[in-house]
Amino acid sequence: MSETALSLASLVLEDLHAEIGAKFAPFAGSNMPVQYGMGVMAEHLHCRAKAGLFDVSHMGQVLLYPKTTMADLTLALERLMPVDVLGLGLGRQRYGFLTQANGGILDDVMFSNRGDHIFIVVNAGRKTEDLAHFAAELSAQAFITPVTERALLALQGPLAAKAMARIVPDIQSLYFMDCGVFNSDFGEIWVSRSGYTGEDGFEISVPNAGAAALAYALFAMPEVAPIGLGARDSLRLEAALCLYGHEIDTSISPIEAGLTWAISKQRRPNGARAGGYLGADAIEAQMRSGPTRKRVGLYPEGRAPMRDGTVLFSTSGVEVGRVTSGGFGPSLSAPIAMGLVDAAHSALGLDLLGEVRGKKLPVKICALPFFPNHFRKRSTT
Amino acid sequence: MKYTKEHEWLRLEGDLVVVGITEHAASSLGDVVFVDLPQVGTDVKLGQEVAVIESVKAASDILAPLDGQIVEVNADLADNPGLINEDPDGRAWFFKMKIKDLSALDSFMTSADYEAFLS
């Protein structure tokens, strides 16, 4: 056995995945199911049409309990993220990102207000860095507890709510970005109505002891099929969601990554709690004068996919950027990509060239997302 | 039918060698979404990259199994790369080659050899 294999973490549901026909590959230090018998294309389309169950237990689950008050804790977290943490309502979840002094992104996260504490889900490949960052920055305000005895499953797709309601009837009370704690036959489950596919659905934190039984209960339902990491990537790409290490990293600012929408108005210049977070100077400067590069959607014109790292050129041959995520969009039956390009070459509809195996092939800048979101939002009045 | 260790199959058709990939290769690649075929008339050397297959997961090279010349390519694959998953041993042939000495085929694996190689 190689050293890599020895250091690879096993998901608590690894045996279950093997039993239902998963093919495995290493990802972010874990041995992950990449696809099952249906294959990536069929799994992707199944999730868009019905409901898919993903094992995302490789991601980090962290609890932050206040040492003094919740207000102190939320304000401390606001020093790490340009988002409104203080104003997040009870039972609500929000998307945020941990910034660093240069304005780059340490990680993107989902956090929830659970009354007397905050629950954060972080990327698998960034757990170590995030926990070190929390320890360095939040130790005066928070007891930081990594959750180690729970699996994380995602049930996504238009029929996810129908399936989930058979497990917990009360689930219908949740709208997009709501979260709750529910008793179930599988132990106490922590559920949020969110995900990373662009579909309606849930992320479910379940005690390890109940995880396999919950997964089998869902798989027994006609709507639900297992979906691997391969389709998870094509689903999130079609939904134009950023992936750490691709669209975002420590050298890319949230403004460049097209995440300005996620910077809460309270934290923007002239907001009630403007600035005061790591990298605020750099990020506010980019908000004022515009970033020098931008995340864009890309439609290769032929059938050849343009993968991560493909170098992009203007039609006059000047290098203008690179592809950050690229592949095939099964819902569109066409190759799709996202990239970071110089702001001067980021206009919608602009023709660029992408170099694939030595050939410069035409590619057009397009609007994002590639596939519309289907979240169950509370109707706004 | 003969087989290479690179999971290609070779079939003699008159004096031409037809080349495709095995079912094992097609199923490990996953859903194929794009094929880049060589130009007809290209002279190729054993081991040279002559075609590229892109699946939903990744790109893979197809290597020339022998020295020779590409005399025909399967245009159907460009329009319908999914054929490679549907019928890898049949309709999803990649190209036909003219080679100097057909006896070179004898050095490749038989069907039984290939099965043993896979296991």
Image: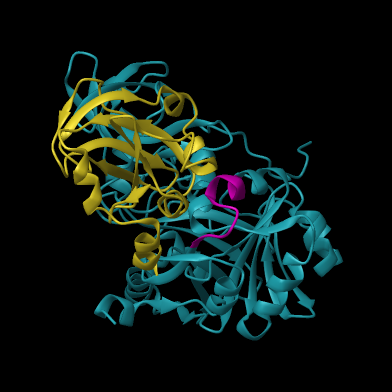
Chain colours: A cyan, B yellow
- Residue A283 in view (yes/no): yes
Residue visible at 77% across and 50% down in the picture? A159
Residue visible at 68% across and 58% down in the picture? A225
In reply to whether residue B88 is colored magenta, the answer given is no
Relative placement, left or right, of A115 versus B1 is right
Q: Which residues are magenta?
A: A34-44
Tell me where residue B75 appears, x and y as whole percent: 41, 22
Q: Is residue A246 above or below residue A370?
A: below
Name the residue nearer the viewer: A194 or A54.
A54
Q: Which of the 4 quarters of the picture holds residue A69?
A: bottom right
Relative placement, left or right, of A56 versus A292 is right
Relative placement, left or right, of A105 versus A233 is left
Residue visible at 37% across and 68% down in the picture? B116
Q: Is residue A301 above or below residue A309?
A: above
Relative placement, left or right, of B85 versus B12 is right
Q: Residue furthest top?
A: A316
Residue visible at 33% across and 70% down in the picture? A133
Q: Is residue A1 above or below residue A174?
A: below
Tell me where residue B44 appears, x and y as whole percent: 16, 32
Tell me where residue B38 appears, x and y as whole percent: 26, 27
Q: Which of the 4 quarters of the picture holds residue A290?
A: top left
Q: How many marks?
A: 0
